[in-house]
Image (tube, coloured by chain):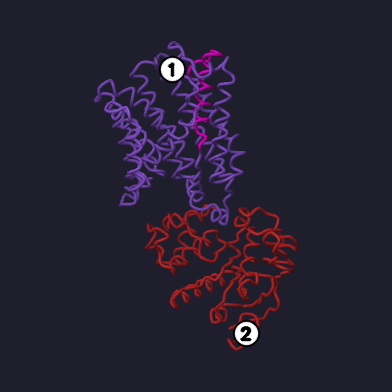
Chain colours: A purple, B red
């Protein structure tokens, strides 16, 4: 077993144990962090590994969230198929977005994806009779169960989030070690050089974006079922910037970076908001320090200083 | 056999290649010489599909290449070592080689064969490509191209800026490849390097091949070097 696999298994074991060690207050927090980390992992596949700086990921997350939420509320789907629907919807909307947006690159790609996300946000508001617009809707507690497991209660919710996180993390690890993962990195490093070696940039980038969308869709779907609320705010630009910040903080192009970033950012906001109402100032200052002293994020910084084996 | 037949190529409105014809046969090294701006690099880029061919044809064993998208060309077994190496500088030597291997799904056997040509790279597998010396970077650029197991190898001034021992190493490697049947097109400005490797020398001027010589009894005093290259 390599050091990298051992580290990932150790993180999962630690998260498993945390449920028994930490006070109950943290259980919901960490469950939320794990789900958001899956979202950030998806973002990292597009941005950290493939070099696609997207501002449209809120659309993929919200698509998963709404597909699952509306599936349950409007069509009466049980939670399991609704979750699968959310996952697939996230991938499908990413594919549709990618087919058009990947005809551009760099800043243009960023703007086009932002426009798609804004269009998605406005669509949610426009169809308010189904989505309940800005107000959103709550998924009934009775519908939030997988067989005998009530996912609205703390312990099953925590372990459901852990299972999702573990699957996402291990799949991510397998992806970056695969041929596709290496082609993605080549694309990030230099698209023209990759083409010279026989790689089709459009195909590689579209595949990466669809995988990224599947992650975001899965995270959105899980968020709806585990926390019971579906709202338009999840489609707003903040939810496109949030995974970017998580990834930058933890380390772009590292498998554990998104989780580390989500964990630190979540608790930084949580703790600083208990001290001052200007907690975003604290977050901003922390990000400034990071950009100045560790521009590759925490794990990127560690990788540059000897831990080259970090995937 | 790679055959360029009366090709034209342009960057926008600026036409660079004008009816250029050239042939590269298996087991032979064809050196291309000419002044700056003559069209040598554009010719290589046109073969690789990076510059659109507006007239004429490029075929590999009779199969047209000029209509293929750029990413398809290397999959037909054409390795390209561009000027300036163009490595993935942030990736390690091993990762650069891996990316080369994946194009045509080659494995450990090809990797070992390539590394046996450049033992120094084997010692630096975990080193970042951007931290290699110029000569080592050139070795890696050639190694990465060889990972495709190419039937045709294109090199754009591979000896530029290298110390003599590195030039000798690269020359020996190209001669080894030649003996295995690889067709090589080498764009080169150093007359001594050309004379030690070439089977044919094509002189390019104004976007076309003005003259081709067999490399028999040639020397640096051959007037064509002065006429077309200015040395």
The magenta segment is A55-79
Q: Is residue A298 visible?
A: no
Q: In the figure, A188 relative to A35: above or below?
A: below
Mark 1: give few (<14), some (14-19) or many (20+) Cα within 10 Å. some
Return the chain for callout 1.
A
Would you say residue A225 is visible in this rendering?
A: yes
- Residue B161 drawn above or below residue B94: below
Q: In the rendered structure, does residue A130 fall within the stretch colored magenta?
A: no
Q: CA distance from mark 2 to mark 1?
A: 81 Å
Residue B113 percent across, percent down from the top left: 47, 63
Taking the magenta stretch, the answer to whether it contains residue A71 is: yes
| In the rendered image, the vertical position of residue A241 relative to residue B196, given as above or below | above
A128 displayed left or right of B206:
left
Q: Is residue A242 left or right of residue B75?
A: left
Residues at discs 2 and 1 in contact (Cβ within 8 Å) = no
Tell me which residue sits at (32%, 48%) in the image.
A293
For the residue pair B159 and A181, the one nearer the viewer reads as B159
Q: Quadrant of the N terminus of chain A?
A: top left
Q: Which quadrant, please, contains the C terminus of chain A? A: top left
Q: Chain of mark 2?
A: B
The numbered dot on residue A228 is 1
Q: Position of residue B159 (x, y in %)?
A: 50, 73
Pointer 2: what residue? B226
User: Looking at the magenta stretch, what is its main secondary structure?
Assistant: helix
Q: Quadrant of residue A278?
A: top left
Residue at the image point whose x is 39% and y is 27% from the top? A163
Q: Secondary structure at mark 2?
A: helix
Judged left or right of residue B119, residue B175 is right
């Amino acid at each position: 077993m390599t050091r990298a696999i051992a580290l990932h298994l150790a993180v999962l074991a630690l998260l498993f144990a945390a449920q028994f060690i930490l006070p109950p207050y943290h259980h919901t927090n960490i469950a939320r962090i794990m789900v958001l980390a899956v979202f950030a992992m998806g973002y990292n596949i597009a941005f950290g590994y493939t070099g696609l700086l997207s501002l449209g990921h809120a659309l993929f997350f919200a698509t998963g969230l709404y597909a699952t939420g509306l599936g349950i509320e409007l069509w009466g789907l049980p939670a399991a198929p609704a979750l699968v629907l959310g996952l697939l919807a996230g991938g499908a909307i990413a594919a549709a977005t990618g087919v058009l947006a990947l005809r551009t690159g760099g800043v243009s790609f960023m703007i086009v994806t932002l426009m798609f996300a804004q269009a998605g946000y406005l669509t949610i508001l426009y169809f308010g009779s189904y989505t309940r617009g800005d107000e959103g809707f709550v998924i009934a507690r009775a519908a939030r169960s997988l067989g005998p497991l009530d996912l609205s209660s703390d312990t099953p919710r925590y372990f459901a989030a852990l299972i999702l996180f573990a699957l996402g993390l291990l799949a991510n690890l397998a992806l970056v070690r695969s041929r596709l993962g290496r082609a993605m990195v080549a694309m990030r490093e230099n698209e023209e050089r990759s083409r010279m070696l026989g790689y089709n940039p459009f195909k590689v980038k579209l595949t990466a974006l669809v995988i990224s969308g599947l992650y975001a869709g899965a995270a959105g779907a899980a968020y709806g079922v585990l926390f019971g609320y579906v709202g338009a705010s999840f489609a707003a630009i903040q939810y496109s910037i949030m995974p970017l910040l998580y990834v930058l903080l933890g380390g772009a192009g590292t498998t554990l970076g998104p989780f580390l970033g989500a964990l630190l950012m979540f608790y930084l906001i949580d703790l600083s908001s208990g001290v001052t109402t200007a907690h975003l100032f604290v977050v901003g200052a922390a990000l400034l320090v990071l950009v100045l002293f560790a521009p590759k994020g925490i794990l990127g910084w560690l990788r540059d200083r000897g831990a080259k084996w970090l995937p | 056999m790679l055959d360029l037949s009366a090709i034209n190529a342009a960057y926008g409105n600026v036409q660079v290649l004008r009816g250029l014809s050239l042939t590269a046969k298996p087991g032979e090294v064809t050196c291309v010489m000419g002044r700056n701006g003559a069209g040598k690099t554009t010719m290589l880029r046109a073969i690789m599909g990076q510059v659109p061919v507006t007239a004429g044809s490029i075929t590999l064993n009779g199969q047209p290449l000029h209509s293929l998208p750029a990413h398809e060309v290397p999959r037909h077994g054409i390795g390209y070592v561009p000027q300036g190496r163009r490595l993935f500088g942030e990736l390690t030597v091993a990762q650069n080689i891996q990316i080369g291997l994946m194009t045509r799904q080659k494995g450990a056997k090809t990797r070992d064969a390539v590394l046996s040509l450049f033992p120094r790279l084997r010692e630096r597998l975990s080193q970042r490509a951007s931290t290699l010396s110029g000569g080592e970077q050139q070795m890696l650029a050639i190694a990465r191209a060889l990972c495709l197991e190419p039937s045709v190898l294109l090199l754009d001034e591979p000896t530029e800026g290298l110390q003599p021992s590195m030039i000798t190493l690269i020359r020996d490697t190209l001669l080894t490849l030649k003996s295995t049947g690889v067709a090589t097109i080498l764009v080169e400005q150093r007359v001594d390097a050309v004379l030690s490797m070439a089977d044919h020398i094509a002189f390019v001027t104004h976007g076309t091949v003005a003259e081709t010589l067999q490399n028999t009894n040639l020397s640096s005093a051959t007037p064509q070097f002065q006429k077309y290259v200015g040395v």
